[in-house]
Each structure stands twice: as structure tokens, then as C-alpha cells.
Amino acid sequence: MRARLARAGAVAGGVTAATLLAVTTAAAAGPPVPDFRGKALTDVYSAVGFRTRVDVHDLSGFRRHVLWPAHWKVCTQSPAPGQRLDSGSITIGAMKTDEQCPRTWAAGP
């Protein structure tokens, strides 16, 4: 009888540990990434958590630095909309709000 109870406890503990691991893994992956393309760069910073790294690249080819995110818009993003944010960072291709996104990048990744 004691052996059955010990075996039952081990099985129940294993199931609990497996469930906890699955929940922790899903939480670590993060929520799906929204579609930021065409929106202001400030929307990206508002939507992602402070622990998420945001890498912004100027798509104009002039290698400008983004000093005022409110003056920039998102043309591309990686990971793509709907994918999970696994790496803890998001890469944004941006242009100034009064400029058009390059045609080769306008469709997104």
C-alpha cells in the first residue's frame, strides 16, 4: 500500500512540474507582437515592456540616429506581427514621419 501511495505522489508531482514548466515557457515567450507598421515609433515603446530591447534602424540609408521617437514612423519590424517575442528584443526599420517608407521595405518582412 505504501509503495502505491509513493508512486502516486511521484506521478502527481511530475504532472505538476510538467504543467508548471509549460506555463512558465509560454509566459517567457511573451504575447504576440502587434503590427506596428505605419504607426508612430512611440507606439512601439508604449506597447512593449521596459525589459524589451528596441533596436531602431534608419531605412533612408543616411544612418541617422533616432533622437525624437515622436518624429519617426515604423516601416518594418522583426519579429513579424503575430509572432511571439522570444528573444526579448524587437528590431524596427523606421523613417521620419514626413518621409515615405522605401518601396522595397513597405510590404514588411
Image (cartoon, rainbow, N blue to C red):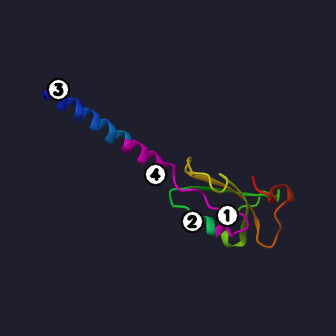
- Residue at far left of view: 1
| Residue marked by disc 4 | 27
Q: Which residues are magenta?
A: 19-42
How many other residues sit within 10 Å of disc 3, few (<14), some (14-19) or many (≥20)?
few
What residue appears at the point 71 percent right and 72 percent down from the top-left corner? 71
| Sooner in the amino-acid sequence: mark 3 or mark 2 | 3
| Sooner in the amino-acid sequence: mark 4 or mark 3 | 3
Front: mark 3 or 2: 3
Q: What's the distance in space between the residues labelled 4 and 3, CA to CA?
A: 36 Å
Residues 81 and 93: in front is: 81
| Residue marked by disc 1 | 36
Looking at the rendered structure, the secondary structure element under dot 1 is: loop
Looking at the rendered structure, the secondary structure element under dot 2 is: helix
Are the residues at dot 1 and dot 2 in contact (C-beta closer than 8 Å)?
yes
- Residue at far right of view: 103
Q: What's the distance in space between the residues labelled 2 and 4, CA to CA?
A: 17 Å
Query: Is 54 part of what is drawn in magenta?
Result: no
| Sooner in the amino-acid sequence: mark 2 or mark 4 | 4
Q: For this view, does 81 lie left or right of residue 30?
A: right
Specify the quadrant of the image occupied by residue 65. Answer: bottom right
What residue appears at the point 47 percent right and 48 percent down from the top-left corner? 26
What residue type is disc 4 on? Answer: Ala
Front: mark 2 or 4: 4
| Residue marked by disc 2 | 47
Q: What's the distance in space between the residues labelled 1 and 4, CA to CA?
A: 22 Å
What residue type is disc 3 on? Answer: Ala
What residue appears at the point 46 percent right and 45 percent down from the top-left corner? 25
